Image (tube, rainbow, N blue to C red):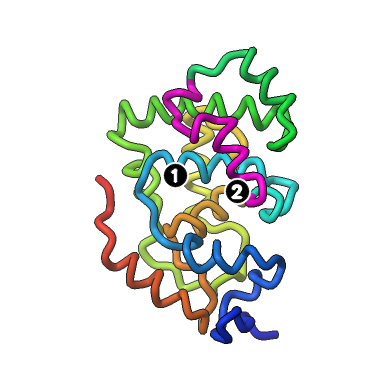
């Protein structure tokens, strides 16, 4: 089976785009392009944790609702959420109403503040786990040595809902690796963006 399918313009895209029409835009504009903005990185870690056990289509459809519910994923604001906010969020039908995951976002916001304090930025911390060499075929696994190492360090620092599979999906999406399929028209664009990226330090 081919790793790609024709996109709306007839050019090849990663096969997973076939799962939903809205995936093509997300794939072409976001997935795999490197991100160094702390807010976007925090948001994606949160959304990946919410996805656990669900489909990305569900989360993507609710993404704007999540942003509204969690103050645009400004971790400094979310870190101040209290029991009243948890109760509010559990009544919000626009998001995934899972107490453990909601409380994890608040906890992880606090942990993000700690990382920014000690490491300078969340981006600087996360990009240290970018693998130097990775010869694995794209989209042939759900974890890696790098995602396991990052997951372990995050959990050591008190983060929740950040297992190796969740972290690997995060690394794929935020461009810490280029996991676009061979032959996908976006793969070279992502490769170029990664070459040009100024890594945070």
Residue denoted by label 2? 166
Q: Quarter of the image for the N terminus: give it.
A: bottom right
Residue denoted by label 1? 40
Q: CA distance from mark 1 to mark 2?
A: 16 Å
Query: Main SS of the magenta segment?
Result: helix
Q: Residue, x 27% and y 53% (percent of image)?
A: 199
Q: Position of residue 28 (x, y in %)?
A: 50, 68
Corner quadrant of residue 57:
bottom right
Tag shown at residue 192: none
Bin the neighbour count of mark 1 within 10 Å (Cα to Cα): few under 14, some 14-19, many 20 and up: some
Q: Residue, x 48% and y 80% (percent of image)?
A: 185
Q: Is residue 66 magenta?
A: yes
Q: Which residues are magenta?
A: 60-79
- Sequence-wise first label, 1 or 2: 1
Q: Position of residue 134 (x, y in %)?
A: 44, 68
Q: Is residue 9 above or below residue 90?
A: below
Q: Is residue 30 above or below residue 97?
A: below
């Amino acid at each position: 089976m081919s790793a790609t399918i024709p996109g709306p313009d007839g050019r090849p895209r990663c096969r997973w785009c076939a799962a939903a029409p809205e995936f093509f835009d997300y794939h072409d504009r976001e997935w795999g392009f490197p991100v160094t903005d702390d807010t976007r990185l925090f948001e994606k870690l949160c959304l990946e944790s919410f996805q656990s056990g669900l489909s990305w289509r569900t989360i993507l459809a609710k993404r704007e609702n999540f942003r509204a519910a969690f103050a645009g994923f400004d971790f400094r604001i979310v870190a101040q959420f209290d029991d009243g906010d948890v109760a509010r969020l559990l009544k919000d039908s626009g998001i995934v109403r899972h107490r453990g995951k909601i409380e994890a976002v608040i906890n992880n916001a606090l942990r993000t503040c700690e990382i920014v304090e000690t490491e300078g930025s969340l981006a600087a911390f996360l990009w240290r786990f970018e693998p130097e060499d990775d010869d694995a075929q794209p989209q042939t696994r759900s974890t890696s040595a790098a995602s396991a190492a990052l997951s372990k360090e995050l959990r050591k620092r008190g983060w929740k809902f950040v297992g190796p599979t969740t972290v690997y999906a995060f690394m794929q999406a935020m461009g810490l690796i280029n996991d676009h399929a061979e032959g996908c028209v976006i793969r070279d664009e992502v490769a170029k963006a990664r070459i040009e990226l100024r890594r945070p330090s």
